[in-house]
Image: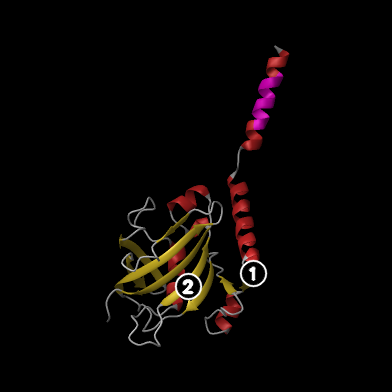
Amino acid sequence: MIALLVACCLGSLTACNDYETYGDKKEKERKAIRQFLADSSFVVISESQFHANGDVTDVAKREFVYMDNSGVYMQIVNKGCGTPLQDGENSDLLMRFLEICLLDSVSLYNDVNPYDVDVMNVKRQGNTFTAAFTSGAWASSSYGTSVPQGLLVPLSYLNVGRPRSADDHIAKVRLIVPHTQGHSVASSYVYPYYYEISLQRKTDL
């Protein structure tokens, strides 16, 4: 009987040791982000440095800015052409993206076939952006149609017009998005994701 009780206790301890708390998962997420930054030789700058530099990141120096309020890391590759979304504006944006989970390397993307593009409807009120996907790979995935807040962080700093000349460039950013700013899978499993995203208006103003 005593041997049986000891065995049960040991089994319980093993189960406890195997259980991951939310704190454990968050620490694993932080380590994955730190490792990814180190492996990629990215240099993290503060938000104050970012603003002092004119709201740009130096791609040649591999700079990523850490956004204090959201915890998102952002690199602006191209600020884009045209104009930013204006206060009160409701516009459809075309988005091409590459998404990689930093914990299991699973990817989702629509940046290979030129005809595969996601459409998101974005509304701006003051400095607040809300958006939903209306078509594309994301909209048809298990993530749902709501656009995660982490993907909307760059919109305050980008122009989202359509190129009209060879010198015009589509807005492009790279992001590291923590689970708190991510989609349903990210928030459920406490997974961080890396993104490469390009954005432009669906139609000219």
Query: Disc 2 to disc 1, how far (Cα)?
Result: 17 Å
Question: Is 7 colored magenta in this rendering?
Answer: yes
Magenta stretch mostly in which secondary structure?
helix
Q: Which residues are magenta?
A: 6-14
The kind of residue tagged 2 is: Val
The quadrant where residue 18 appears: top right
The quadrant where residue 52 appears: bottom right
Q: Position of residue 39 (x, y in %)?
A: 64, 64
Q: Position of residue 19 (x, y in %)?
A: 61, 38
Judging from the image, what secondary structure is the residue with disc 1 in? Answer: loop
Q: Position of residue 152 (x, y in %)?
A: 43, 68
Q: Tell me, for residue 173, which label it has, or none.
A: 2
Identify which residue, 189 or 38, lies in the foreground. 38
Q: Is residue 139 left or right of residue 67?
A: left
Q: Is residue 98 above or below residue 22?
A: below
Q: Is residue 83 left or right of residue 77?
A: left
Q: Is residue 178 left or right of residue 85?
A: right
Which dot, 2 or 1, sits closer to the camera?
1
Q: Position of residue 17 (x, y in %)?
A: 66, 36
Q: Tell me, for residue 201, which label it has, or none.
A: none
Q: Residues within 10 Å of mark 2 (few under 14, many from 20)?
A: many
Residue at coordinates 41% horizontally, 72% vertically from top-left? 198
The kind of residue tagged 1 is: Ser
Identify which residue, 86 or 61, lies in the foreground. 61
Q: Is residue 182 above or below residue 196?
A: above
Q: Residues within 10 Å of mark 1 (few under 14, many from 20)?
A: few
Residue at coordinates 63% horizontally, 52% vertically from top-left? 27
Which sits earlier in the primary sequence, circle 2 or circle 1? 1
Judging from the image, what secondary structure is the residue with disc 2 in? Answer: strand
Residue at coordinates 69% horizontally, 18% vertically from top-left? 5
Residue at coordinates 37% horizontally, 68% vertically from top-left? 95
Q: What residue did someone put label 1 on?
A: 41
